[in-house]
Amino acid sequence: MSALNISLPRFDYMCQKNTYSGSQGRFRYKFFPEKKDDVDTVLVAACYFDNCYEVELEAGRVTRQEFEYSNEGIDAAQAWLSAQYDETQK
């Protein structure tokens, strides 16, 4: 079991184009919908450290992963974020 204790918002929150972010220690994450190919929408989870997302993204220090735009995608994103956190704790 991961030491990262998060519960991402469900699809009804995300389909309103909301962003969700949080942190545990230096580990920060952001979860948001994003258009892809001007048609499909995916959910993106990102993890980064120290600074805000925009600064870390510009510096190339953000790890991102896309997920299906559904409740199953949210579950997969939560598992991925937990695994990313666990990797930082080794």
Image (tube, grey):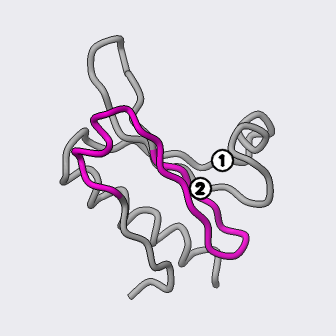
Determine whether, in the image, residue 17 is placed left or right of residue 52.
left
Q: Which residues are magenta?
A: 9-31
Which label's residue is closer to the chain start, 1 or 2?
Answer: 2
Determine whether, in the image, residue 17 is placed left or right of residue 49.
left
Q: Is residue 77 above or below residue 79?
A: above
> Residue at the location (64% across, 82% down)?
89
Determine whether, in the image, residue 8 is placed left or right of residue 90.
left
Amino acid type for the residue under numbered disc 1:
Val
Q: Position of residue 74 (x, y in %)?
A: 29, 54
> Residue at the location (19% across, 54% down)?
72
Residue located beneath label 2 in the image:
47
**Few, some or many residues within 10 Å of mark 2 (<14, 14–19, 20+):** many
**Secondary structure type for disc 2:** strand
Residue located beneath label 1 in the image:
62
> Residue at the location (27% across, 22% down)?
40
As rendered, which of 22 and 78 lies closer to the eye?
22
Q: Position of residue 65 (x, y in %)?
A: 45, 46
